[in-house]
């Protein structure tokens, strides 16, 4: 038997999860080391489907494509005295300003919304005299840069986990919670009751991911005990199940569970092996693997978003340069994004040292025309304007942006800044700033995530967001004449948008290396089970009964994964002039009027 | 195989000689080798997957300015054919009138005008006998730039298409700006093409060839019909695979001179056949 040393006998029940008991038989082959070779007598059936399948499974090169539905609501109007900007607004006070300019009253402020081109994914204003061309223009427009003046587009993948100090305001108690990502999820305690049962309720600012019966490991302890079982979820409010959980109050004394106590917790699945089944928490860090010029953005044929184009005619008598034009406030064009560079995932592993299963379309706000990126705060070198936070930093607090975004040096949150420096340029006697484009190899922080070895699953707790604010020196949205806000309103966008290229199985495999062959190198050892555990990676083209798996075109020896991306630039507030709002007048006689 | 010396002595009994046919090689691993050869042969028969993906090549930014557009001007012979012997450059005009289209035809975009187009062919060589046309770009006549002209004494001037094109990355005239060619050089390793132009007249059904010099120019005035076609029927197009850009050159005078920008457009002149 020539291969006797390579034969392993695995007990049938250990071969796969839920595998049945079957008899094993070993064929003892009386193999020869030679056989008669008959010349001209070799035949082989070529199965093209099998050949295609083999090539498909062997390929590790990708050309990801996405259709971007771009949603942007132009929300803030403001004023500027910089001529090229003044002449390119969607005016809200054209009549007043033109009257002022006729009466020679100074200064005359033309107020309005920046045009849609200032935020569109691809600029089309390549031929605007006094702005992108002509004398005293703001920028000499380069046609090939049309799709990179405002935004840059990249492919990235999560490659590392980092710690970060975080901050959020719990909305119900209006309490500011400070914690670090590695510590877990923050909470604040509120006593409550449910059906007569005394409970200790924990409120969080992000989705806790807990189920009733699971356990939490608290950063505080009661007589040395930190592990408690989850008794209930939610506080009766809609959607609170995801943010609120309770443990039974078994008559705990002392101040441990006083109202207002805050700390952090980690999810635990098995109390008997809590260290092994406890979740880890971290910020996912992405590595950029393309350059800006690799991205190819084109208009999507016949595809518009569902919202109408908002535009108005600006008659020559009501513009500062006496030139009539049509100004567009909001557009509806959708785009297709692809890359000239092929993405090879051969040498890449993700932040959990697993093979790459998803890539990300990463968007970066550039703002090359200089409307954004205020230069005042912080006075650090290089100056950074683009901020980064999470969706728990998005809600307004008392009508103002969360302190996380504050520019005031007294309240600065260093972790709220991205690592992207600004670049300045001077034109027409003024200085403008824009964000330096990322390049291949740069890193950018991503989502706040949870990982559990026992479940072998990563969960996004809170999406990462970037915030854009106007440069108040060139465009002041605070037109009431007050000093510039230290924490101005702005726009948020989600920088990392995933595309699935492979999928992990919905089941967990386990096996002992002594008895099971081919345990993948990304398996983790479970002390609870005493075996290695992992999830298989489904082959390309296979989708299981739960709908998990991928099946996208394979041709030219390359995979063509595709996804739809809804890219939203979310306004934090609004500065809609009251005159433009149509309201129903209150009845003056009775309600039947 | 070693052979011993045998001495055969005649006796009354039969003798037998054992001739050892010793085999010193073995067949171990031969099966694997045959399987490998079989795989290689199958791969040769059915082939490896080839990459036929197209890349989008855009015009490389011109040095010393920010211009990225490609400008084409087409000129048609407007004088009587009898005057060809004494033709001067001004006989070639940048309008469609000499092709039989009136300004009204153009303004109202009549069907024949709508169906007229310029065809830019890209060949691997300039040798007309051996060249292959690898790809083509179509520029529709009604896609061309406009000029103000009068079509009625009772109406204000209106925009009339003239055979000039300013193609760019953005704007209305994008069609034809990008060249789409194989991304991989493994299959066809070509980075230089020769571009010729023809105008297809939707009114007459004829087409006219175009030259990079007009037959009234100093260069061709002495030899209006017997000139070197390899020199005057083409512009050279170079592809740069590192950044997926192209550049167009005039090579008539022996050196490559970049053309296409606004002040040095790519000029095409109708070739007039001998009458």
Image: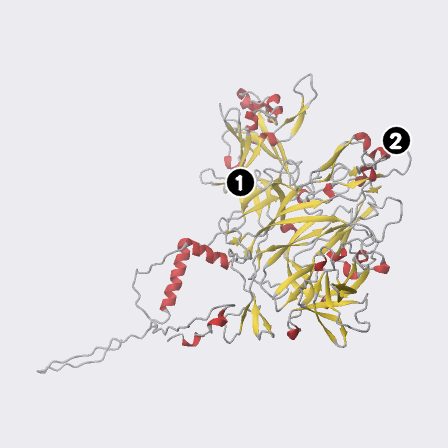
The tag on residue A282 is: none
Crowding at dot 1, Cα within 10 Å, few <14 / some 14-19 / many 20+, comes out as many
Looking at the picture, tell me which residue is in the foreground, B46 or A237: A237
Residue reaching furthest to the top: B154
Q: Position of residue B79 (x, y in %)?
A: 57, 21
Residue under circle 1? B194
A216 versus A124 height, above or below:
below
Point 47% across, 40% down: residue? B131
A49 versus B175 height, above or below:
below
The answer to whether residue B95 is seen in the rendering is yes
Q: What whole-number distance in Å separates the C-alpha atoms at marks 2 and 1? A: 60 Å
Point 64% across, 64% down: residue? A351
Q: How is the image coloured?
A: secondary structure
For the image, the number of numbered tags is 2
The tag on residue A102 is: 2
Of helix, strand and loop, which one carries label 1?
strand
Mark 1 falls within which chain?
A: B
Point 49% across, 30% down: residue? B226
Looking at the picture, tell me which residue is in the foreground, A517 or B53: A517
**Horizontal placement of A217 versus B121: left or right?**
right
Q: Position of residue B209 (x, y in %)?
A: 52, 31
**Horizontal placement of A127 versus B47: left or right?**
right
Point 48% across, 52% down: residue? B50
Looking at the picture, tell me which residue is in the foreground, A481 or B124: A481
Q: Quadrant of the C terminus of chain A?
A: top right
**Horizontal placement of A335 versus A420: left or right?**
left
Front label number (2 vs 1): 2
Of helix, strand and loop, which one carries label 2?
helix
**Horizontal placement of A489 versus B257: left or right?**
right
Residue reaching furthest to the left: B12
Mark 2 falls within which chain?
A: A
């Amino acid at each position: 038997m020539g291969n006797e040393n390579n034969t392993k006998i695995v007990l049938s029940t250990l071969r796969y999860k839920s595998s049945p008991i079957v008899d094993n038989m070993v064929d003892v082959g009386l193999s020869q080391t030679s056989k008669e070779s008959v010349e001209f007598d070799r035949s082989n059936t070529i199965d093209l489907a099998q050949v295609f399948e083999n090539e498909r499974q062997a390929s590790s090169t990708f050309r990801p494509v996405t259709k971007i539905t771009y949603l942007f609501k132009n929300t803030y109007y403001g004023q500027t005295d910089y001529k090229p900007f003044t002449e390119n607004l969607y005016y809200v006070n054209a009549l007043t300003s033109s009257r002022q300019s006729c009466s020679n009253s100074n200064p005359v402020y033309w107020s309005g919304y920046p045009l849609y081109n200032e935020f569109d994914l691809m600029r089309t204003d390549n031929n605007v005299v006094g702005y992108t061309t002509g004398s005293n223009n703001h920028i000499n427009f380069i046609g090939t840069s049309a799709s990179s003046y405002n935004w840059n587009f990249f492919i990235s993948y999560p490659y590392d986990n980092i710690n970060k100090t975080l901050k959020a305001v719990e909305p119900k108690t209006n309490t500011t919670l400070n914690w670090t990502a590695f510590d877990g999820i923050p909470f604040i305690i509120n006593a409550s009751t449910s059906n007569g049962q005394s409970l200790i309720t924990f409120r969080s600012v992000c989705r806790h991911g807990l189920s009733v019966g699971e356990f939490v490991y608290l950063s505080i302890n009661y007589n040395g005990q930190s592990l408690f079982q989850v008794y209930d979820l939610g506080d009766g409010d809609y959607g609170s199940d995801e943010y609120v959980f309770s443990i039974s109050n078994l008559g705990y004394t002392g101040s441990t569970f006083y109202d207002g106590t805050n700390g952090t917790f980690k999810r635990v699945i098995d109390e008997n092996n809590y260290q092994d089944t406890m979740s880890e928490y971290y910020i996912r860090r992405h590595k950029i693997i393309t350059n800006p010029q690799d991205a190819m953005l084109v208009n999507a044929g016949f595809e518009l978003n569902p919202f109408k184009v908002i535009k108005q005619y600006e008659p020559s008598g009501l513009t500062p340069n006496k030139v009539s034009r049509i100004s567009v406030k909001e557009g509806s064009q959708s785009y297709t994004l692809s890359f000239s560079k092929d993405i090879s995932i051969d040498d890449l592993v993700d932040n959990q040292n697993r093979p790459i299963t998803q890539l990300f379309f990463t968007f970066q706000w550039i703002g090359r025309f200089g409307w954004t990126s205020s230069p005042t705060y912080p006075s650090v070198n290089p100056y950074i304007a683009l901020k980064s936070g999470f969706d728990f930093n998005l809600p307004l607090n008392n009508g103002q942006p969360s302190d996380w975004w504050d520019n005031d040096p007294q309240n600065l949150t260093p972790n709220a800044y991205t690592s992207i420096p600004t670049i300045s340029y001077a034109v027409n006697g003024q200085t403008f700033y824009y964000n330096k484009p990322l390049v291949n190899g740069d890193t950018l922080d991503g989502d706040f995530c949870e990982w559990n070895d026992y479940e072998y699953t990563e969960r996004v707790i809170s999406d990462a967001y970037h915030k854009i604010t106007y440069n108040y020196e060139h465009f002041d949205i605070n037109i009431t004449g007050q000093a510039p806000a230290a924490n101005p309103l702005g726009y948020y966008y989600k920088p990392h948008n995933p595309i699935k290229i492979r999928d992990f199985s919905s089941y967990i495999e386990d096996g002992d290396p002594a008895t099971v062959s081919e345990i993948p190198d990304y398996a983790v050892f479970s002390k609870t089970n005493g075996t290695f555990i992992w999830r298989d990676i489904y082959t390309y083209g296979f989708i299981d009964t739960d709908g998990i798996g991928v099946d996208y075109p394979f041709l030219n020896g390359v995979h063509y994964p595709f996804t739809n991306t809804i890219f939203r630039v979310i306004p934090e507030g609004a500065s809609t002039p009251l005159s433009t709002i149509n309201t129903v007048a209150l009845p003056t006689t009775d309600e039947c009027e | 195989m070693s052979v011993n010396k045998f001495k055969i002595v005649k006796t009354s009994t039969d003798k037998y000689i054992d001739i050892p046919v010793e085999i010193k090689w073995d067949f171990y691993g031969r099966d694997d080798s045959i399987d490998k050869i079989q795989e290689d042969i199958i791969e040769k028969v059915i082939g490896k997957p080839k990459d036929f993906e197209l890349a989008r090549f855009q015009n490389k930014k011109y040095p010393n300015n920010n211009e990225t557009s490609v400008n084409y001007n087409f000129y048609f012979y407007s004088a009587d054919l009898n005057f060809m012997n004494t033709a001067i450059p001004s006989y070639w005009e940048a309008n469609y009138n000499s092709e039989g289209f009136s300004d009204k035809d153009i303004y109202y975009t009549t069907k024949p005008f709508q169906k007229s187009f310029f065809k830019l062919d890209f060949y691997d060589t300039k040798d007309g006998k051996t060249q292959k046309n690898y790809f083509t770009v179509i520029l529709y006549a009604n896609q061309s730039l406009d000029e103000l002209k009068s079509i009625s004494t009772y109406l204000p001037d209106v925009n009339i298409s003239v055979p000039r094109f300013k193609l760019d990355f953005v704007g209305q005239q994008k069609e034809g700006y990008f060249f789409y060619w194989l991304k991989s050089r493994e299959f066809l390793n070509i980075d230089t093409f020769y571009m010729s132009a023809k105008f297809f007249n939707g009114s007459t059904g004829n087409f006219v060839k175009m030259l990079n010099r007009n037959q009234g120019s100093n260069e061709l005035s002495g030899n209006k019909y017997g000139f070197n076609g390899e020199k005057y029927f083409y512009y050279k197009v170079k592809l740069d695979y590192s950044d997926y850009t192209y550049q167009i050159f005039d090579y008539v005078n022996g050196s490559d001179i970049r053309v296409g920008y606004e002040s040095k457009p790519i000029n095409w002149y109708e070739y007039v056949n001998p009458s």
